[in-house]
Every structure is written in C-alpha cells, then in structure tokens.
Image (cartoon, rainbow, N blue to C red):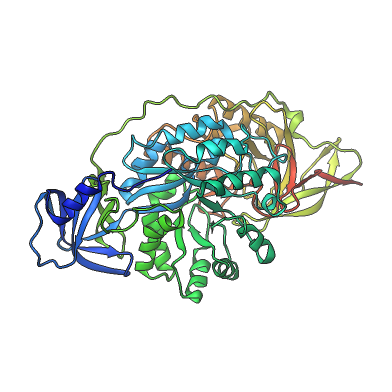
Amino acid sequence: MVDLSCNDRKRLSEASLGKIVNDKVFRNIKILNVFTKQWILAHVYVYKKWISHVEYDVNKEILDCKQIINGDNLYLSPAFVDSHTHIESSLLTPLNYAKLVVPHGTLTVLEDAHEIANVCGEEGLKYMLESNGNIPMRQLLTIPSCVPSVPNLENSGATFDYLLYRTYLEKDYVVGLGEVMDYEGVLCSDERITKILDEAKNKKVYIQGHAPLLQGNRLSAYLCNGIKSDHEARGVQEVIEKYRQGMWIDIRDANTNHNMPKIIEALSEIGNYDRVAFSSDDRRCDVISRKGHIDGIIRHAHSCGMPLIEAYISATYRPCLEANIGNLGAIAPGYIADFNVLDDIENVHVKDVYFEGKCVVKNGDMISHYEDTREALNQTVNIPDLDETNFFVYSKGSKVTMNVIKFESFSSSITNLIQQTFPIKNGKVELSPKGKYMFVSVINRYNKGTHTLGVVENFGINHGAIASTVGHDAHNVTVVYDNPQNAIVALRQLKKQKGGFCAVESGCVIASMPLSIAGLMSNKNVADVVNEINNMNEANVKLGNIYIENPLSRITILSLLVCPYVKISDEGIVLTEEKKTIPLISEVI
C-alpha cells in the first residue's frame, strides 16, 4: 500500500507555525494551485519530505529556514505523475528509466508490471518492486490483473490466481489492480477474473480499466465491477459516453497512438477536464528522448486545444485522485514536496526537480549517480529448434482459402478477419501478390511446445523478416516473414542475443537489438538503446514499412489479444471478441 502522509505530524505543525526551523523555502515563486486552477505568487516551505506551509501574502516576513531558494521569474508545479505505464516497454531497466524521465519532471509513475509478470511471474513483480527506494522517483505498482491476458488462448511464463492478489495488494509501493484487459471475461462473469476483482474490492484498492470500443450495456456492466478508468478510448463519441458514465479518461500518448486530437475535441464538447489524466503507456525511450515524457504530453494536449492549466493539473493532481493516492500531486500543507521548477510554462521547460524535498535535477541534469547491482532476469528466452519446414503452410489442391489478419490501415492497431484465396505450388501455399501479404508465426518461448502460423495484410514490411520477443502480452516470439529461410535466420539471432528484436533481408541480419533482461529490457544506457532502436526502425523502413513514425512497435501488437478484433497467439488465430481460435485454412479448392 502507499502512505505518503507525514509520520511526525506534531513537528510538521510546529514547522508550519515557525516554532521550529524549516528545511527550505521557495521564495516569491509562482505556484500552480490545482484547487483554484491558478498560478499564484507565494512562498512555499518544506520540512523534511513535506510541505509545511504555503504563504500567499508574499510581504510577510520569511520564517526561519535552513535554505532560501529565490523563485523570482520562476514557476513551481507539483512533479508530474503518469497514470498508467509499462516501464518494460521503454526497453530500459527501472533505474535507467528513472534517469531518463526524472529530468523531464516525472517523479511518480503507476507501473503496470504485466509485461515482466507474464514472462517471469512473481520474480518479475519482485524485480520491479525492489527498484523503489534506490532511485529518485516513485515507481508504484498496479498488480497485473491478466497473467496471462486471456487464459486458454495463449501461454505465457506464469499464471496468477486470486490468492496472489490477497498478498501483493497489501505490499509497499502497490496502489491497486492493473488494467483489467479481459473485459469479455468480466462481462461473462468468468470465475478467474471475478475472484481477482473480488480481492481488489475487498482490499478497497484502485482498479484500473482497459475497455477499447466498449459501449452501451456492455460498458455499464464493466463499470459495475468497480473499474474506474480507461486509456483505450479513441473516438469522440466513445470518450463522451465513457465520461458521462463516470469513467476516468487517461489520455494515452505513446508511440504510434494518434487519438489525442479526437479526445481533446470530445472533452472540449463536454466542457470539463476534472476526470482526465495522462498516460505514457508503452512510450519507448527513443520517443521520450525526442518528445519528452509527461511534459511532452502536456505540450501535445495544449497544442490540441486543452487549456494549459487543465493540462498541468491532469499531469499532477488528477492521477493521484484517480488512484486514491493521498498527499501527492498538489502544493499544499501536508503534501509530499515533489516539485518541478520551470522557467517557461508554455513550453513546459523543467529547470530543476525536487524529490521529497531534495534537489535531484539541477538545470536539467541529474546531480547524483545511481547504480543497479541486482541480478538480472536474463534466462527467459527458450526458442525451440525449428527448421524451414515449420514455416511453410502446406495444403493439397491447387488453391486454398485462408483466414487472414488484416490491419485496418498501415498505422492502425485494429485488425479484422478476411478470407483470401492463394495458389498452392508443390504442396505449399504461396502468398500472392508478394509484399501485400506476409507470413506470421508465434512460437512459445516457455517450453510449452506451441507454435502457430498465419498470414497478415497491411503489416508494413513487404520482404525479409522482423522478429521479436516483445509481443503483448505473453511475449512469445513473433516473426513476420516472406520465406522460411529469413524466418530461421531471425530466430537464430534472437536466440543468440537472449531476446529482443532483429531484422533480416536476403538471409542476412541487417539490424538487431538485444533485450537480455526478460527478453524485454536492455541493461545498456539510454543513448545506446536509442541508437539501437533507430537502427531497427531504419531496418523496418528498408524492408518496406515507410508508413509510421515508429515502425518497431508494429510487431508487438499482432499478439495483443485484448484489442479488436483478430490477433494471433501461440495457440492459434484468435477472434478477440468471441474469445475463440479459428483455423488458418478455411477451404481447399
């Protein structure tokens, strides 16, 4: 659990009255008051980790303090809070992630650890929880509700039952239950997810949602289970309906997501932002380096029409309200002294950052050195020995009709089911026209022996192969390829580097990115990881994906069984609404 209240209220009260010395005061600084929605000139006093007093009469004599910080021409906001993220998806370790986002003013994130939990189970949760206390930020956990994301339709590295939540929902640095992605299970009162929700409700913790395109009676039924939020809303009417029904809207601004303008349009129509927070979700480190973190989302939201002060409040106080985190996200007595000092609020330029009253960033740079000496989880990729015969689709006859996964567009994550007829030559299916269609295979990496073949349209690349051990949410091995030879080369490379990404053209590896920690994260520094991402993106472009800004993300969503409407797992081609698998071949001609 999370308790940020002062453990010595008597001394804090005495500091408020000036009876004992405060540690510091920010003098004559314009502060963001999240309650009155104003920037107001004030003096802000800090005693240990907490704010003891905010004085709006700046003509009053300064109380006795150990340190006086001159705030002339500067602004003070609460530090930024991310309402929903997956640190693993940054491709960095928790420590290197902190080194990246803290200078951007983010000091608290709600980390849904379902990526590493699906790979490593409880060891993954422990790995993430142990990060707190050794870094200058708060990486609070929402315990993942879906491990695996959809039982019986994929095989991951672990299975969590309701008894685990009874223990973990009471641990330090845990704020609640992670995004409830199995919305179909919720709606049909599936026993497993129902028991998990019951544990969360018994503990009276925050329950985070994930409900793409859910509406009407189905949305109401989902909300009746105590779920509070959604970061999957896309269209104007969807946002309006969910807001009217009392949901918190977590505006997601990740890698390839382009829904911000429509969401802001909906909120402008509603005329209210009080139940809105910001989420970076799966924002990779290269995107953070280029566009910022929550500071970048504030800029983007404001450019789309959100009033600037509303954007700041949605980046600070509102995520804390949403997740029931007290004493965080505001500049007021008794609140934690997490601050951003800014010299330009329009451009969200963070100059200095204070974590629990101590300066951790000065003029944009971290001022202390941090090391991670923990043992890494680096033995998680077990790719079976396969040969080229495992990557052909065999059939009799002269033609075959197959169930094809078709992306709505080259930039959309929505996939639909179509039937397409292909020729057969020497007993093997040939994709025609070449380039429009690609083979896809998902291979279990947890020694389960499961392996699926499929065909995808509008994926992006038109030749070669892209392979990854990052594949939401089970993170099995996914490879998209034109011929088995390229697929085998890609798999051998992934095995050699203990996970990650690679690209193959004409039987040669043209780019690779090792992610040896759980097959999800690199232990390299930010600059090196960003360089490898750029190389992988360039390789994707070389193979034909010229359609999206961050093509590396494309392969990771093919196995995302909790998004509409058809995906692929190690168990088969999955109709995500019906929660069932279908065969690849529907008819032999």
Q: What residue is rendered at 15% in x and 50% in y? A: 24
The x and y percentages for residue 198 are 60, 47
The residue closer to the viewer here, 427 or 318, is 318
Whether residue 438 is visible, yes or no, is no
Q: Is residue 482 or residue 8 the one in the foreground?
A: 8
Q: Is residue 268 left or right of residue 218?
A: left
In this view of the protein, which residue sits in the foreground, 61 or 534? 61
**Residue 370 sits in which quadrant?**
top left
Q: Residue at 52% across / 60% down in the picture?
A: 258
* Looking at the image, residue 493 lies above or below residue 7: above
Q: Is residue 465 left or right of residue 513?
A: right
Residue 539 is situated, as x and y percent measured from the top left of the image, at: 54, 42
Q: Quadrant of the N terminus?
A: top left
Farthest-out residue, front: 10
Percent coordinates x, y for residue 347 in the rendering: 31, 62
- Quick check: 385 above or below 354? above
- Position in image of residue 530 (x %, y %): 42, 41
Kindly identify the residue that appears in the image at 34 percent across and 36 percent down.
133
Q: Is residue 272 above or below residue 107?
A: below
Is residue 106 visible in this depiction of the protein? yes
- Tell me if residue 197 comes above or below residue 27 in the rendering: above
**Total numbered labels:** 0
Identify which residue is drawn at 57% across, 33% down: 119
40 or 471: which is nearer to us?
40
